[in-house]
Amino acid sequence: MRIDKMLANLGYGSRKDVKKLLKDGAVTVNDEKVKDPKHHVNPEQDAVIINGEKVEYKEFIYLMMNKPPGVISATEDSQFETVVDLLEMEDLVFSPFPVGRLDKDTEGLLLLTNDGQLAHRLLSPKKHVPKTYFAVIDSEVTADDVAAFNKGVILDDGYETKPGELKILKSGITSDIELTITEGKFHQVKRMFEAVGKRVIYLKRISMGPLKLDETLELGEYRELTEEELDMLVNYEVR
Ligand code: URA
């Protein structure tokens, strides 16, 4: 791969910026100064150093975001801000996209990656990757609801959901719950509560398969997955 392409791909600026870096003598490849933008490198093997810092080459990027309310889980939207608009340039250059969708008003764990294969595996309806949500409900959630969700409920369009595991954290005038589901129908959590005559007033995803939301991330913040998280995700087999 040409050195200027590799560095531009990695977010070191436009091809023009990269050309200037090279011309200024800021770049070495295997300890030799390289000034020619056409110089070829093997990104997996050659030691490329810019101003004394080693360049880490990677093809894929895996980001965990704590999605804030008010932004759309898409790469672009004509009207609203998207989760991709929240990314830094150095991550944007990898063209990541959100793996699945959270509603505009839903918060919490969202994975963004440019690894289409992994995204496909995680989203495949056949894989039944469990997703756990924390929600506040507008009324009292009862043991009857737990039993109904455990069987599966009928949504407004007649679809019978797979069983969901409902845990009541606090029950009262409003209730706090956790719900784990293995499907991802449109507005599924909200519609499952509508099916038992209740309304979700706050919704946050807290896990997806083996991945747990890092609670130290403020709304709108994100970070790369750790190696351990990525390993768990890649090797994840659904029961
Ligand atoms: N279920 C919903 O209703 N909304 C979401 O954003 C995710 C799951």
Image (spheres, helix red, strand yellow):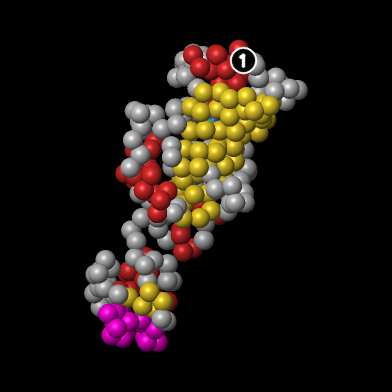
Query: Within the magenta stretch, is there residue 33?
Result: yes
Q: Relative to the observer, which residue lies in front, 184 or 204?
A: 204
63 w.r.t. 7: above or below: above
Residue 233, percent across and down? 38, 44
Q: Quadrant of residue 199?
A: top right
Quadrant containing the N terminus is: bottom left
Q: Which residues are magenta?
A: 21-37
- Picture residue at 46% right of the left edge, 60% below the top: 91
- Picture residue at 55% right of the left edge, 37% below the top: 205
Q: Secondary structure at mark 1?
A: helix
89 w.r.t. 180: above or below: below
- Picture residue at 46% right of the left edge, 64% below the top: 90
Instruction: Find ligand 1 in the image and state its quadrant.
Output: top right
Quadrant containing the C terminus is: top left
Number of marks drawn: 1
124 w.r.t. 108: above or below: above
The reply to whether residue 158 is visible in this rendering is yes
Residue 3, percent across and down? 30, 74
Would the CB of label 1 be found within 8 Å of ligand 1?
no
| Relative side of 25 to 39, left or right | right
Q: Residues within 10 Å of mark 1 (few under 14, many from 20)?
A: few
Residue 209, percent across and down? 43, 37
Q: Which residue is mark 1?
A: 143
Q: Relative to the observer, which residue lies in front, 9 or 235?
A: 235
28 w.r.t. 140: above or below: below
- Picture residue at 65% right of the left edge, 33% below the top: 202
The reply to whether residue 200 is visible in this rendering is no
